[in-house]
Amino acid sequence: MTMDASNYRRVPDGVVAPRDAADVAAALAVCRAHGVPVVPRGAGTSIAGQATGTGVVLDFTRHMGAVVSVDPQARTAVVQPGAVLDRLRDAAGRHGLTFGPDPSTHSRCTLGGMIGNNACGAHSVAWGTTADNVRELSVVTYGGAELRLGQGWGNGAPAGLRELVDGSLALLRTGFPAGLPRRISGYALDALLPERGVDLARAFCGSEGTLAVLTEATVRLVESPPARALAVLGYADESAAAEAAAGLLPHRPLTVEGMAQDLVRDAGGLPKGGAWLFVETGGGTAGEARARAEEIVRAADALDGTVVTDPAGQRALWRVREDAAGTATRMPDGSEAWPGWEDCAVPPARLGAYLRDFRALLTEHGLRGTPYGHFGDGCIHVRIDFDLLGEEGVRRFRSFSEAVAALVVAHGGSLSGEHGDGQARAELLPRMYGDELVGLFGRFKDVWDPAGGLNPGMLARPARLDENLRFTVLPRAGAVDTAFGYPDDRGDFAGAVRRCVGVAKCRVDGPSQGPGVMCPSYRATGEEQHSTRGRARLLHEMLAGEVVTDGWRSREVRDALDLCLSCKGCRSDCPVGVDMATYKAEFLHHHYAGRVRPAAHYAMGRLPVWLRAAAPAARVLNAAARVRPLAALAKRAAGIAPERDLPALAARSFTSWWRREGPPGDASPGSATLGNASPGSAPPGSATSGTGLVLWPDTFTEYLSPSAGRAAVTVLGAAGLGVSLPPGRVCCGLTYVSTGQLDRARTVMRRTLDTMAPVLDRGEPVVVLEPSCAATLTTDLPELLGDDPRAHRLADSVRTFARALEEYAPTWTPPRLDRRVAGQTHCHQHAVLGDAAERRLRARAGLTGDLSGGCCGLAGNFGFERGHYDVSVACAEDQLLPSVRAAGEDALLLADGFSCRTQLEQLTGRRGRHLAEVLAEGLGEGLGD
C-alpha cells in the first residue's frame, strides 16, 4: 500500500478493509479523534500518485466489492466502491447493457477508483467519462456527515457549499477551458452552475478522495451493441493519425484509439503504416457493424485499412492496446520509462499539432517516449525515459513537466485527461486555471473537509511533483549481490524489482478475465500480498530498508513469497515481464544462507538425489507408502502436506528400460540407432544434419513417469527420427532453483554442462518432455551461469516434444485419433516455451478441445508442502477442474507436466497423460508403467 502505479511512494500507518458503510464511519471517527489522515483506495492503479498516502488507507477491494443490484428497465446499477468494473459489466451484460467508461485496467479497476479519478477509457467518444454516467453517490465526510449526492442543492450539499458557489458564479463560468471532452484536471466546480443543474454527484467525480469517502454509487448503464467490428487504419506517422482522428467522429464510432510503431513490437497483422487508429463500430447485427466499419475505412484518408470482425482477432488487437501501460515502461533498448506526464488532453482538432510540438520538446530535453491513447478525445498517454534515480534526472523531470504543462495550456488543453492530477500535476494547476480559480479549489476542499484529513497533498495545496519519488530509497545499481544474472535488467536486482509499475494485471480475480496464468495465488486468496504486485512491493520495501528493516532475513517477505507457486505466469502475462519465480528463488537463496531450511527444501528440493537412491527399492518403498502410519510419518518428516498421497516410484527407471529393452542395436546412452537414422546421418525430415535428437531423461520421467519417455521414443522413431540419451547423468536443477538452493543448483548445472559437452559440440537438438525442466534449461540455466557459453548453447538447443516433431519431421503424419481432450497447458510452457506447436500437433491428430489456462496448483513442490494444500486445490478449481468436469468422462485428459498429471489424479481420480503417450497409443503401443 506504499505505492500505486505512479512514480510516488508514501508509507501509511495502517490499512483498514471495511465491511460496510458503518465500518467506514467508525474508521473515520477513530482517525478523526487522533488526527490521522485517511486515503480511500480501490485497486491502486492510479498513475498520478493519489492512491498513496500517510495515515490510514481504506482498502475497499476486500469486502465492499459487490454489485448490489442492476435495474435493466431504469438502466442503472447500484455498486459498492470496491466493485471491479468487469464484474459490473458482466452483470449488466446479461441484460444487453454495459457501463460505458472502460479504462484498460477494466479487469481489476474499481468503481470507487473510477469515480475518484473520473476515469474514461476507450469508449468515451461514445459514452463519456465516469462523471457522465453517475447518478447518485452515498458518501461519508471526514467529519462524520453522511450525505447522498445527486442533482440540486437539496441532495446532500455540505454546509457552506451553496454560498461558495453563488459567490463565485462569474469565475466558474469563465475559468474552465471549453471544447475539451477530457478535462479531468482540478475540481469540476462548473458542474454546480445553475444552468448545469447543480450536479453534486458530477462535481464529486474526480475529487481523488479529498472531499469524502464513497460508500455506494448509483450509475447509469448504456445499451451494448450486440455486434461490433474493428476498423484498423494505417498512417504514415502518429501526427497523421492524430489529425485524421477528429474527422472520424461524425461517423459516431465507439472508439478512436491511436498508437505508433515505436510501441508495437510486432506489427504483423496490422495494415501498413507507422501508426494506427483502432476505430470500433457497433450494430444490431454483424453485418451492420461491419458496414459501418467499412464506411469508416472508405472515408478515412489512410495509407491502408482493414476490418476485423472475428471476436478473437479483435481481442488480440485490443490486448496490444490495453497492455500498453505496461509495455511502454520499457524502451526498445531495455531502458526504463515512467509516467509523470501520462495523460494530458487537448481539443481533438489540435492533437496532431500538439504531438509534433510534444515530440520536439522531448528532443529538446533529451528524452524519449512512446505516445498512444484516445486520439478521438485528444487524450495522450506516454511513458518517458526519465532518470528518476539521480538528482540531475529528477531536475530534468521537473523542468520538462513545467515546460510541457505550458505547451498543453498553449494548445487549450488539460493537464490530465483521464488519470487525475494526483501529485504528478496538481502543483501545476495554476498554469492551467490561474491562481484565483485554484484558490477557489482550496476553499471548495475546506467546505467538505475543514480538518484536511482526507488525502492531504492532493489537488488542493498539493505536494511538489518531485517529492516522495519511490525510486530514491532504492540502492544504486550493482549494490545488491545476487545469484541470478538478470540480463534484461542489466544485472541489477533493484532494476528487476522496479519492473513492477503497479498496473495490477496480476489482480484479475477469475478465469472469466482471460486464459492466462498470472496470478494463481491471488486468485485463490484475493489478498494483495499474494499478488505479483504485492510481492514486488514488499521486495521494494526490503531493498529500501525503511519499512522492512531486516533485509533478506525478512519474515514479512518470506511469508508473502510462501504462496508464490513459482509458476512463472507473470513472466509472460505481466505487461512488463516481472518474474516473481526468479525473485522468490533469489530471496530464498539469501534468506536461508547459513541457516536451517524447512524440511520440504531438503526433501523435495533435493528430489533427484532421493529418487536416484530410492530407485533400486521402488517396490518396497511403494508398499511402505501404502501403510498409512508409515506414510504419515514420512510425510511429516519431509514437510509434506498430510492430505497428499505420495507418488508411486516406477518399478523400472526410464534409462534402465532404455538399456534393456530400448532401441535395437547399441542402446547405450549417447547412441542414435532408432528408426531410419544412423550415427552421422540426417534423420528423415530433419532440418539439420547430425546423429538425431537427444532425449533428456528428466527426474520425473526417469523415476516417476517413464511411460512418457518410452512413448516419446516410440513416436519419434515412428516419425523416422534417431534418438539418443545424454552420455551421462544430467539434471536441469529445477528443484534446487524452486527452493532457492542456488549454489547447489549451479553445481548441478555445471556438472550437467560437462556431461552434455559432446552433444553441444555436435549441435544436436535436445528434446525435453517435462515443460518445467525445459523452461529451467531455457531460462534459469543461462541466468544462473551467464558467464558459461555452454549454458546458452544448451538453452538454445532445447525443444519440446511437439516442436521437435514439427521441426525435424515436418512431413510425418500422426495417427488420427478423433477424440475430445481436456486438461492443462503447463504454466511454464505457457510462460516460457509457448504451446503453438502442441496445438498444431493435436489438431493434426484430430484431438479437439482446448486445454485450460491457469496453474494446476501443484506446481512442483508447492502443492506438496505442508500448509499449501487448500491454496493448491483452490488454484486447481480456478480453471483446470471446472474444464475437466465440463468435458465429461469421455474426454482424454492431456497434461505434459508431471505435476499437472499428479494433481488431476489426486483430485479427480482420473489419469492424465503426456501427449506422447496418447500418440503412442494411437500407433498401437501399450505403454503402461
Image (cartoon, helix red, strand yellow):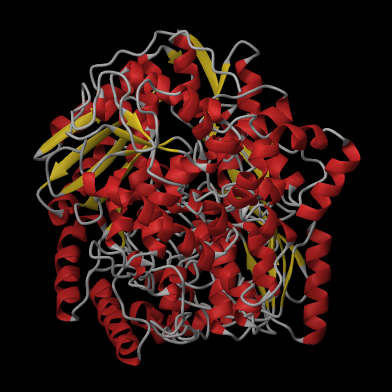
Q: Where's the N terminus, which quadrant? A: bottom right
Q: Position of residue 675 (x, y in %)?
A: 30, 19
Give the residue furthest to the right: 629
Q: Where's the C terminus, which quadrant? A: top right
Q: Quadrant of residue 879?
A: top right
Q: Position of residue 282 (x, y in %)?
A: 36, 29
* Frontmost residue, 170 versus 335: 335
Q: Could you tell me if residue 308 is visible in this image?
A: no
Q: Could you tell me if residue 882 is visible in this image?
A: yes
* Frontmost residue, 810 versus 411: 810
Q: Position of residue 690 (x, y in %)?
A: 20, 35
Label total for image: 0
Residue located at (34% from left, 82% from top):
431
Q: Position of residue 390 (x, y in %)?
A: 35, 88
Give the residue furthest to the bottom: 391
Say above or below: 2 vs 257. Answer: below
Say above or below: 280 vs 262. Answer: above
Q: Quadrant of residue 250?
A: top left
Say above or below: 270 vs 113. Answer: above
Say above or below: 660 vs 616. Answer: above
Residue located at (35% from left, 54% from top):
324
Q: Image check: 761 left or right of 148?
A: left
Q: Image check: 434 left or right of 532?
A: left
Q: Quadrant of residue 663?
A: top left
* Frontmost residue, 746 versus 114: 746
